[in-house]
Amino acid sequence: MILELFAILISLVGLIGMGVIIFRKIPVLVELPEAKIEKPRIFRKLGHKIKNNGTVKSFSSKELLLQKALSKFRILTLKTDKKTSNLLAKLRQKSIENKKKFSEDYWKRIRGGK
């Protein structure tokens, strides 16, 4: 109980301290001039090269890009469906083999063994 009260007290003091610091710094932050951030020339050149690339131009249509992405996703789901189907068939076959190994007099032997 005392530890919980102590932890709550420390948390409240910390929150009040952060609030005071933020309250004091807001006027200073408001007075700062807005700085214009400019991209380095490397990124501008790289962006220009990517835009002019032929493969990127072929994906310029959003519908075409979406169509290709959905077809890839469909192929992936069909592959996983086929693998799960094969695994399920193997499990069913194993279950049938285990049932064949199980003899009919199993429960009679268990009860008779008591």
Image (spheres, helix red, strand yellow):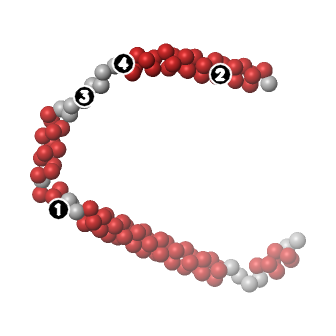
Work out whether mark 2 precedes mark 1 in sequence or the reverse, and give the earlier one. 2
53 or 91: nearer the viewer: 53
Residue corresponding to mark 2: 12
Q: Quadrant of the C terminus?
A: bottom right
- Between 65 and 92, the residue placed more toward the observer is 65
Rendering coords of residue 77 (x, y %): 40, 69
What amino acid type should be assigned to the residue bearing mark 4? Glu
* Residue 80 appears left or right of 11: left
Residue lying farthest to the right in this orientation: 114
Q: Amino acid at mark 3?
A: Lys
Residue mark closest to the camera, 1 vs 3: 3
- The residue at the point 55 percent across, 79 percent down is 93
Dot 4: few (<14), some (14–19), or many (≥20) neighbours within 10 Å? Answer: few
Q: Earlier in the sequence, mark 1 or mark 3?
A: 3
Residue at x 47% of width, y 75% of height: 85
Residue 65 in view of the camera: no
**Badge 4 is on which residue?**
31
82 horizontally vs 90: left or right: left
